[in-house]
Amino acid sequence: MNAQLYTVLVVDDEAIVCRGIKASLEASGLNITQVLTAWNGYEALDYVRMESVDLVLTDIQMDGMNGIELMESILSEKPEIPVVVISAHDEFGYAQNCIRLGARDYLIKPVLLDQLVQVVGRVLSDRHEKYKRIVEDSLRHKFSLTGMTSIRTYILNEVIAGSLIPSDDDPFLFEQIEVKLAGPYFAMFAVELLWESAGREGDAIKTFRDQNLMKYAAYNIIEETTSDWNAVTFFGQGNRIYTILQFGGESDNLPDRSEHVTKLNLLATTVANNISHCLRIEPVIGVSPPRFGLQQLPACSRQAVEAAKWRSLYDTHNVFYAEDFSMKEAFIRVDWQEKTERFIEWMKTGRRDEERRENILRFISGMAPVFDTYESTTGIALSIAYRVYAMLLDMKETVGERYLALDPLDYFQGHLSGIAIKPRLELFLTEAAALVQTSMDDRDRVIVQQAVEYIRRTFRNKGLKIQDIADHVHLSPNYLSYLFKRIAGETVWEFVTALRMEESRHLLLSTSKKRYEIADEVGYESPEHFSRIFKRFYGESPNTVRQ
C-alpha cells in the first residue's frame, strides 16, 4: 500500500520562522511532499481554499487577520483540516480559545524544532489512523444485531416517531438506557448509507451481513466524529442511522442560532466526509434546524428525513439542511390521496430525465385497474391531472405563466375516452414533472446569480468569507458551495479569485499604480502573495504583464 503523502501550511508573519519550520519539516521524513508558507491569515486562507492542505501550523499575533480569526474561518470552511498553534502567548485564555476552535496542540515560542516535528508527525498520523482504526475494529467485531435491536434503540426510535408521549417518567426511562436528553434545544441528523454504490469499484452491498457490518462501522464513525458534541446516535431501520444533537438556551430564544446552524452543517459535512473516506460508501445526511423542547424530536426527525430526499435531485451532494429547501417546499405543499400522494412526494423535488420517465411509467402501471374500468377512467385521470395542476399553481412564483399550458380543461379536450386518456395522462405528467425540474433549476440559478452579484460588489474586501456570501442568500455555506459549483462550474473562491485577477490585470495595464497598491485594492494583504496568485492564474508575473 502506498504511504500517505501530506501538504502542510505554515502561517507566521516572520519570514525567518516560516523558512526554519519549512526546512525542518521537509527534512523530517514524515512523507510531507509540500510545505506552503503564508505571512498572514488572508494569504493562508487562499491556500486553504485552493490547495489540498492536510495540516495548518499558525501563529496567533499577526497583522490583518490574526490566528484566531484564521482558525474560525478554517472551522467554517474546511473543518476537517487540523490546526496546531505556535504562539508567544502563554496565557491560559489564549490556549483555551484555540482549543475551543479545534486546535490539536498549542506550542509556546520558542519551539524546539524536534518537538515541533514530533507534534506534526503525531497529528498527521492521528488524522490518517483515527477512522481507519474505527473501521478495522468494526469489521473485526463479531457479526451481531445486539446493538441494532437493543432496548435503547427501540426507545429512541419510539421517541422520534412520536409514539412516546413526554411525561414525568422520561428522566427515569432515559436513565435506564443511559441517555441524557436535556436540551432544551434539539436538532437531528438522518444518515442514509447508499448500499448500491460502495468501494473503489462502486459495487453494491447486497448481503444482510455486509450491510449491517457497514452500518455498525458507520455508527462508530458518527459517534467518534460527534464525540465533542452533546450527541446521541442510534440505529434506524434499513440503511438509516440517527443522531440527536442538543443545545443550551432559553425558551424561544436560542443564542446565536445562525452560528449553531452553521456548526450543524459543518459537523454533518465532516461526518459525511469521514464515512465516505473510511468506508468507501456514499452517505446522505438530512439535517433538521434546532427546535425547542423534547416534544419536537418527531418534527426534527421528519425534517431531517425529508431533507435527505433532495439527494434525488442533487445527486452529487451529500448534506441537505432542511431550511435550505423550505422555500421550495412552501410552493408545492398540497394534500393528496394515498397513491397519488406518494407519486407527488416523489415528483415535487424535480427529478432527472431517466428516473422521471421510469417512475411515471410505474405510476401509470400501478393505476392499471382505473384504466380497465371505462366508467371511472375519465374522472380519476382528470382528478390526478387537476391535483398536479394545483401543485403547479402553488408554484406560480417559480414557474411563472408556464403552468397555463397544462390547464387540464384544455389539455384533455378531445382525449377523454378510456383508450386515449391513458397516454395523454402519461404525457401530461411527463411535461408537468419536467416543468417542476426546470423551475427548481431556475430558482437555483437565481440564488447563484444573487451570490454572484454580491461577490462582484464585495470581492475587493480582504475579509470576505463564504459565510458572508451564504448569509446574503440565506443558505448554509455548505449548500451554497455545492449549488455554486453545480451551476457556475467553478467554486465560490475560484470565482472570487478570477474577479480579483481580472481587476488587477486591468489596473496593471491601465494605471501606473504600484504592485502593493494594486494588491491592496483587489483584496490581498501581501503584495508577494498577490504576485504568487497572479502568476499561478496567468502563467506570468505582474511585472511581465506590465512590460
Image (cartoon, grey):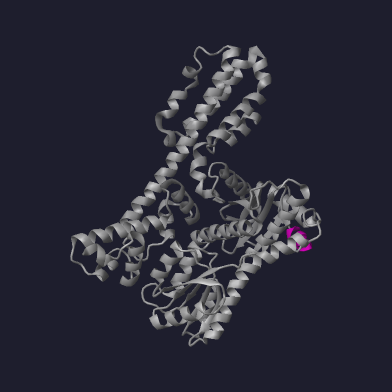
Magenta highlight on residue 175:
yes
| Residue pictured at 73% horizontal, 57% vertical | 216
Left or right: 28 with respect to 453? right
Count how many numbered circles sit on residues in the image.
0
Examine the residues drawn in magenta and state their main secondary structure.
helix
The answer to whether any part of residue 140 appears in the image is yes
- Residue 106 picture quarter: bottom right
| Residue pictured at 32% horizontal, 56% vertical | 499
Left or right: 488 with respect to 235? left
| Residue pictured at 29% horizontal, 57% vertical | 502
Rendered position, 183 above or below 316: below
Instruction: Find residue 488 and report its horizontal and vertical position in percent.
Output: 41, 48
Instruction: Find residue 358 and report its horizontal and vertical position in percent.
Output: 60, 31
The answer to whether any part of residue 181 appears in the image is no
The stretch of residues the image draws in magenta is 169-176
* On-image quarter of the C terminus: bottom left
Magenta highlight on residue 257:
no
Residue in front for this viewpoint, 28 or 365: 28
Residue in front for this viewpoint, 502 or 471: 502
